[in-house]
Structure formats: structure tokens, C-alpha cells
Amino acid sequence: MTMVLEAIGLHYAYEGGVAALSGLDLAVERGRRLAILGPNGAGKTTLLLHLNGTLRPSTGEVRLDGLPVGYGRRHLIDWRRRVGLVLQDADDQLFAATVAEDVSFGPLNLGLGDAEARERVGEALRALDISDLADRPTHMLSFGQKKRAAIAGAVAMRPDVLLLDEPTAGLDRQGALLLLAELEKLSKAGTTLVFSTHDVDLAWSFADDVALFERGRIVAQGTSDAILTDAAALAQCGLQPPFVARIGLCLKERQAPGNGTALPRTEDQAIAALGAFIEGQFPIAAKGLSQ
């Protein structure tokens, strides 16, 4: 187990003494997909802004590959090259005239030559499946296209870790599925993903690991299977286990045939498990339904 990014004892308060982080500890394992899960307004965005150096804690430290990071200009440039951040509202990040110009900003800011910058832009646009939007003015993009363009801008930096603040917020179901499919490709290519969300169902279907966030601290962290089936831990954050997981647990308690040892992760898998259960319990009725 190799930790690429860690937060240790982070404390941070906004003006007026409003505490946002209170001794927060977090560990991000290389190559995994980590969901930071908590209710809206809990401070998840504040945490992400600390993880890429936008905000500096009053006490505590952030580590990359086990080493404390620095906050000097050169340190921050290297940090943000390795740890990219995509904000919830893409309009907060898109500012250039066209998509290609916006995506090229990061590589050019690293001091790369035009040829290498163009190569990275093309690579990032292909990774997010928006090559056809390269010359499109950013103000003429749909909401979902803006999300992808903002992510492409971060991907062009070739980060080790990509932080995403509520990545599916504001997207319809189809748009969310398309975006998650592209993020899964990035994950399989080796990018470590860390995303904030209040959606337990998203965390269940997409995350390898989950950190429960509540009142400025992590109250539990572990695999998604362990954390998202722990009703007591979720209740501390005002959450319930994911619906699909609850179906799986219910079937497992009844030793449903065909359910196996793994819980369903998607609605389709849950429906298949329910079908197997009905067929096992009521074979004649199941046969009649299938005809």
C-alpha cells in the first residue's frame, strides 16, 4: 500500500473564526479512487483546496509521496502539476476564448514548448472525448461539455492525482454516466482520483475507498464495501447506506441464490440478483414471467 497524498492534523478556519477543518487526517492510496463523502456545506471543497495547495492550513501538513510539501512559488508549481483540481462550477476555471486555448494554459504555464503543449492538449481532449470541441468558444459549451473541458485542462498537466469537487453535480443521468466513463479510463491509465460528493450511490458504484467527512474531520476511512455498509458510521454524517448495497445485504441475509459473495454495485446487478432470488424462491412464477 503506497500513499501518494496525505493530510495530517489539518486545522483551518475562515474569517470570523469559522472552523472548516479540525485536526483532519486523510490518506490517499496511489492508483485508487477515493470518495470524500459528506453532507453539503460540510467543508469538502475546503479540504480539496488544501490538497492542491490553494489553501494553507493554520496547523498540520500535507505530504506528497511521504514528504511535506512547501508553499513557495516553485514548490506550488510542482505540487499543482502533480495534483490537479477541478472545481464544481466549471465556469470558475474556463477563461480562454476556445477549448484548446484553455486546455493549453497549464502546459504553457509549465514552460513547455508549443509542440509539446499541442501534444498534451490533443491527448487531453481525446481522453475526455471532446476533440471535436477544440475550436469551440468556451461560452458556447453545454454544462456537461464545460465539465469535460475543465477536466481536460487538468489532465493536460498529466497529474498523478486528480481532485474533483462534486464531479456529477448539475449533470443529468446520461451526462453523469458519460463523464464517469471518461474518468474510469483515466483511472485505468493510472491516475489516482479523489472526488467529493454527498451522493452515497455514486460513491458505491464508482469509488474503491471512502472517507466520511463530518464537522471538519474524517470520521471513518476504508474500502467502499466496509464504510458504505456501516449504517452507524454513515448516520454520523446524516447519510444512509446506498440503495443498491441495501438490496444486496437484504438478499445476502436471505442467502439468495446467485448473489455470491460480492454485493451488487450497480442497479443492473441488483436487478439480476433480485431475479435470481425470485427464480430460486418461486421458480414457477419466474418461469411464467419469463414467457
Image (spheres, rainbow, N blue to C red):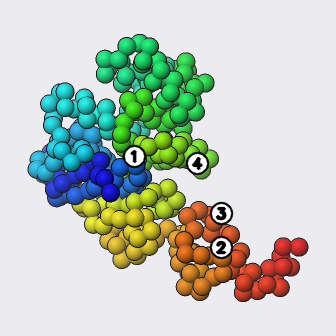
Judged by depth in the image, the label closer to the viewer, 1 or 2, is 1
Judged by depth in the image, the label closer to the viewer, 4 or 1, is 1
Q: Is residue 99 visible?
A: no
Disc 3 element: helix
In the picture, the quarter occupied by the C terminus is bottom right
Disc 4 or 2, which lies upstream in sequence?
A: 4
How far, Cα to Cα, is label 4 from label 2? 22 Å
Task: Provide the residue designation for mark 1.
Answer: 192
- Disc 1: CA contacts within 10 A as few (<14), some (14-19) or many (>=20): many
Disc 2 element: helix
Rendered location of residue 197, percent (x, y) = 41, 54
Q: Is residue 213 left or right of residue 254?
A: left
Contact (Cβ within 8 Å) of mark 4 with mark 2:
no
Q: Residue at x 45, y 24 (%)?
A: 120
Q: Residue at x 18, y 44 (%)?
A: 67
**Which quadrant would residue 171 be assigned to in this image?**
top right
Disc 1 element: strand
How far, Cα to Cα, is label 3 from label 4? 14 Å
Task: Provide the residue designation for mark 3.
Answer: 268
Task: Provide the residue designation for mark 4.
Answer: 177
